[in-house]
Amino acid sequence: MLAFACVSARSATPLRWSRRSFLRLSAGAIAATTLGACTPARPGGAGSRSTGPALVPPADPIAEAASALNPTWIRRTARGYDPRRSGELQILPLAPNYVGDGLPHAGPWDYTSRVPMFWYGPGFIRPLGVVDERASAADIAPTWAELLGFRLPSTQGRALARVLEPAVRRPEPPRLLVTLVWDGAGRNVLDQWPTAWPNLRSLVPDGAWIEHAESGSSPTNSAPVHATIGTGVFPATHRMVGHRLRVGGGIVMPWNDGPSLLERPTLADRYVEATGGRSVTGMVGSLAIQLGMLGHGSAWAGNERPLAVLRQDPDAKTLGAEYPRWNLPEPLPRWYRFPAYVNGLPGLATYLPALDAADGAADGRWREHGLADDVLQGGFLSPARIPYQTRVVEEVIRREGFGRHDAPDLLFLNYKVIDQVGHTFSMNSREMHDTLRTQDEYLPVLIDILNREVGEERWALLVTADHGSTPDPRISGAFQIPMAGLARSIDEAFGAPVVREVKPTELFVDLEALASVRADLRDVARHVMALTQGDLAGEGASAPSDPGARAFEVAYPSSMLPSLLRRVS
């Protein structure tokens, strides 16, 4: 029940999945509605028309296809949608297909949504082992608040009171609560490599492993899910709905201008305000999009600036671009505090020899990659990053006194490298096996640090992930849909630049340009649903396995989501 192996434990060789098994693993998907009535849209086209008296409205293939979706997918999508900030058109590739480069993981399917959720802390967390219960990222903040004896108002999640020791057995709250995110290490990654995480598995009987945990919303990206972890509400409410947001007529990246776009306070925000500075909070991660689990910093109620350690490229052209040194790029120092001493610790190069020797040969390589190769980003895209970051975490806990203040402290950690390896090499790669194994090896190291710096039975820990990772298309059989090719197909069909931006689950559309050619969003949806692999083949696309096969399961105006949600509620 804890893990379903998709590999041979002896050989650790990934198995090739059939399309049927992929769908079963990803969601038990409902068979798609036949879309024979869908044809490429023409400017001004109104779709099929009845030739006689219409006593019954003609079939609407868009509504039929959307209504046939798995109800769980609809709920996840609705939780991640805001009419003011999200794209105007929802798109859902026909699984296992996906939209975008670098193996994106955004979507409502189970393989992107299911995550580990393991609560641990002797004296505070009940030793329940595997708990046959459902939970989401929105339940994390309320559960921590319950353990603190702190009222956290207006959450959509619930406190998982079952996992907590009764209050009479814990007369004092823990001195430190640690939220540890293994970024990208969804259940499909753990299940793919079941022998690579023995330390986490060995702890399960002494804590509470929530068997049916998920991120809870779609798109399953870091920015919205980390904000859900922090606030206890879903993106539709905290409004950090994706890695692109429609704001003031433009499309912006979240966190570029600080925390102002996060519209709900986090547990850390409210707790620091309530304790009047008698506790400290902080985060060690890599990118600003992870700050949603920490919160607004000094922008909330005049709180002191919490500690934040990132390594984000100050001149990043893409959301995930990182920097060789730990930093806190502008304008974030206005709201958060960067501890300069972390760059005085041993550099990443200190940890490369151990990685080099791990395969028994000190040859300057990890797997088939030279340690100096660009693909490894100077070693940051390798397991060497894990001990390097853990040393920073240790120093931060010690110097900042986490767990030694008048009120309990909150520490948030994001280890990004599993996600990066998934994007670059895939979840099925031997590189992923090595990285997951190293991440697991440093879990007891972190526990030793907490026991030494805070004290045994004086802290509690949550291990979770923000999303899963996408399988190698050579194994899943997925057709990779290029963003540029999809936009070009739509713009050419309508004779106007109607697509503002393509994301893996949605389109931002120029409604004025669309209206100028006497078309609407339903016309665009019909065009997208009629596209085949052959239509989208070309630069940036994978080779079509079946040129005549539909590329998308459904496309529909985002405004339909409330009515779809009512049907499944």
Image: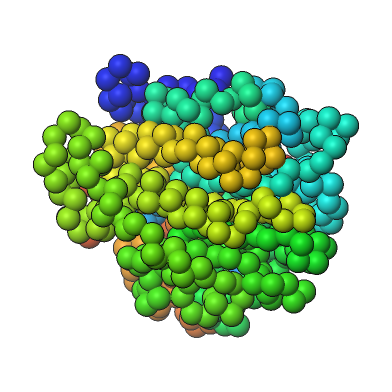
Residue under the point 81% across and 62% down: 275
Question: Where is residue 155 shown, x and y percent of the image?
Answer: 78, 53
Q: Is residue 493 above or below residue 294?
A: below
User: Image check: 208 left or right of 482?
Assistant: right
Looking at the image, which residue is at 27% across and 35% down? 430
Quarter containing the C terminus: top right
The one nearer the camera, 456 or 298, is 456
> Where's residue 530, x and y in %?
41, 53
Return the residue found at the far top.
10
Q: Is residue 187 at least partly visible in the picture?
A: yes
**Residue 435 in the image: above or below residue 377:** above
Task: Looking at the picture, tell me which residue is in the foreground, 200 or 130.
Answer: 200
Place of residue 488 in the rendered image (x, y in percent of width and height, measured from the top left): 33, 68
Q: Residue at x 44, y 35 (%)?
A: 440
Quarter of the image containing the N terminus? top right
Establish if 229 lies above or below 558: above
Q: Is residue 276 left or right of residue 372?
A: right
- Report the residue at 57% width, 71% height from top: 337
